[in-house]
């Protein structure tokens, strides 16, 4: 069940973060501000994270640029994350959080630090929904309606 809007965390820590891309180069997430986003925190060792990747890929393709999917790996090194992303055909932007991962998730409302953890952020930077656990097509479809509201 998604939390009510007034219980949602601020997206500010996300847009303030600079994480590593899969080539281990710094990437400022501020460049995604103003776009509807599905931000998915994952790890290679997390079974539910692996299970939801195909849904995220399909959802991004269905949205055709209206909603961007971002993957944030709770990983220490870019190279293994890059190999994982290639193996799972992750065609959306993927970042490696390194030491920032757990603190960033906690700042974004995930007090337990569990995975997978997904935030839905509208074009105004408001977190309109968050979900701990496996994302399903119905979750993404429901979030899309919120994210694409004018």
Image (cartoon, rainbow, N blue to C red):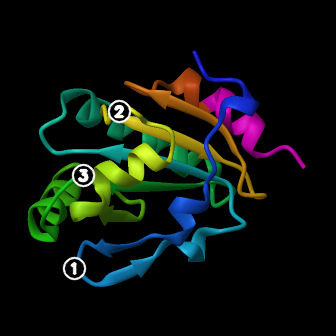
- Residue named by callout 2: 52
Disc 2 or 3, which lies upstream in sequence?
Answer: 2
Q: Where does residue 134 sit, x and y in percent of width and height?
A: 38, 25
Asked if residue 57 can be seen in this view, the reply is no
Asked if residue 112 can be seen in this view, the reply is yes
Which marked residue is nearer to the observer: mark 2 or mark 3? 3
Q: CA distance from mark 2 to mark 1?
A: 24 Å
Q: Residues within 10 Å of mark 3 (few under 14, many from 20)?
A: many
Residue 24, disc: 1
Please say if 124 is above or below 15. above
Using the image as rendered, state which of residue 27 and residue 113 is in the foreground.
113
Name the image quarter holding residue 78: bottom left
Region rendered in magenta: 141-150
Is disc 2 placed on a helix, strand or loop?
Answer: helix
- Residue named by callout 3: 74
Disc 2 or 1, which lies upstream in sequence?
Answer: 1
Residue 57, disc: none
Is disc 3 placed on a helix, strand or loop?
Answer: loop
Q: CA distance from mark 2 to mark 3?
A: 16 Å
Q: Is residue 143 magenta?
A: yes
Q: Where does residue 67 sit, x and y in percent of width and height?
A: 64, 54
Q: Are marks 2 and 3 in contact (CB under 8 Å)?
A: no
Name the image quarter holding residue 101: bottom left
Q: Residue furthest right?
A: 150
* Residue located 65% across and 68% down the image: 33
* Residue located 33% across and 83% down the image: 26
Q: Where does residue 124 sit, x and y in percent of width and height?
A: 78, 58
Disc 1 or 3, which lies upstream in sequence?
Answer: 1
Which marked residue is nearer to the observer: mark 1 or mark 3? 3
Q: Is residue 44 left or right of residue 110?
A: left
Q: Residues within 10 Å of mark 2 (few under 14, many from 20)?
A: some
């Amino acid at each position: 069940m998604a939390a009510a809007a007034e219980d949602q965390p601020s997206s500010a820590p996300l847009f303030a973060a600079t994480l590593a891309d899969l080539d281990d180069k710094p990437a400022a997430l501020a460049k995604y501000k103003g776009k509807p986003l599905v931000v998915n925190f994952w790890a290679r060792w997390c079974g539910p994270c692996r299970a939801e990747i195909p849904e995220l890929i399909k959802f991004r393709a269905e949205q055709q640029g209206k909603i961007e999917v971002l993957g944030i790996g709770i990983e220490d090194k870019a190279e293994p994350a890059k190999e994982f992303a290639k193996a799972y055909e992750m065609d959306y932007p993927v970042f490696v959080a390194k030491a920032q991962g757990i603190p960033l998730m906690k700042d974004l409302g995930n007090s337990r630090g569990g995975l997978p953890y997904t935030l839905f952020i509208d074009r105004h930077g408001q977190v309109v929904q968050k979900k701990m656990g496996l994302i399903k097509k119905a979750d993404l479809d429901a979030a899309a309606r919120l994210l694409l509201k004018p």
